[in-house]
Amino acid sequence: MLPHLPPRPADSHKGTFGRVFIVGGSEPMIGAPAFAGTAALRMGSGLVQIATPRSILPHSLSICPELIGLPLTPSSLRAFDEAADKATSIAIGPGLGQSAQSFTLLKHLIRIKDKPLVIDADALNLLSKQKRWPATFRAAAVLTPHPGEMKRLMNLLDTNLTDVPTDDAGRLKLATLAAQTFKCVILLKGHRTVITDGTRHHVNTTGDSSLAKAGTGDILTGILASLLGQKMPPYDAACLAAHLHGSAGELAGKRLGQRSTLARDILDSIPQAIHQYKRA
């Protein structure tokens, strides 16, 4: 049974629905943090801030001017920590790159205990390069690997597997091992996305090949970060985010054709996916 959507009280204001902080972006990928941020706004967040390199920040904000920007520079760590402190949920990874500065930012965020964290894309790749899971990891985190990223994370698991299984049972077994080892919720993407906290599990049934385009994973990160910022528990938020993300992909594919759907079309379908879910 999927959870209810977060409530929308009539007497609310933008602060009622959370402040999401998204860290990512690099010169080759200016759209990634903007897509994640736009998805968070579409999902109902009141305030969304993106932290991205100064050189690309104006371009990222032009994609969605409703976002708040934080330019990342070598001397911006104090402002970064202040923004993270104000947030009710944080996501790191979309378009991040794997520079030394990116790893420094990641190390700061995984130490935070009192707010949920989504770890995606290059943030997962940075973790997979470590010799062991960081002892400083304190965050209540949801990890969202696709199979390639999961394969790299397998370096940190006690497993004899050499590749990520493609069957439901094998994917669930691997995701459960990762959740128990890392003490995080795992959202293993792919056809029939698997979500587990190491004890409970859910297999998502929405989505189609409309989602097989660059940028769609960033949208899932934004939807998930928004739900976490609206105080949903991490496991519930991950299950609902996967469902709504898949539904938005299906709706966009029906409108435009699965072959031609772009990530921006899935962003535009989030409101309809929410409405459809509310009626179910």
Image (cartoon, helix red, strand yellow):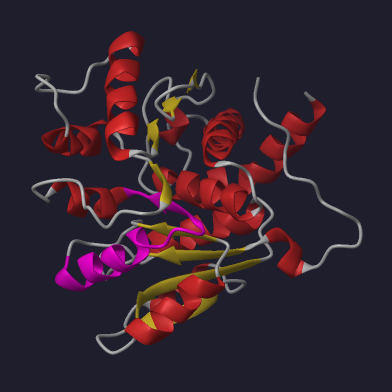
Image point 12% across, 19% down: which residue?
Answer: 161
Which image quadrant is residue 55 in?
Answer: bottom left
Image position, residue 91 (x, y; %): 43, 57
Image point 79% across, 46% down: which residue?
Answer: 7
Image position, residue 228 (x, y; %): 57, 49
The residue closer to the viewer here, 228 or 31, is: 228
Residue lying at the far right of the rendered structure = 10
The residue closer to the viewer here, 231 or 54, is: 231
Q: Quadrant of the N terminus?
A: top right
Which image quadrant is residue 32 in?
Answer: bottom left
Image point 47% across, 24% down: which residue?
Answer: 208
Q: Is residue 105 magenta?
A: yes
Image position, residue 264 (x, y; %): 51, 51
Q: Is residue 146 magenta?
A: no
Residue 69, compared with residue 75, is above or below; it is: above
Q: Quadrant of the C terminus?
A: top right
The residue closer to the viewer here, 86 or 70, is: 86
The residue segment tinted magenta is 99-120
* In-image side of 263 versus 144 (left or right): right
Q: Is residue 58 visible?
A: no
* In-image side of 257 versus 159 (left or right): right
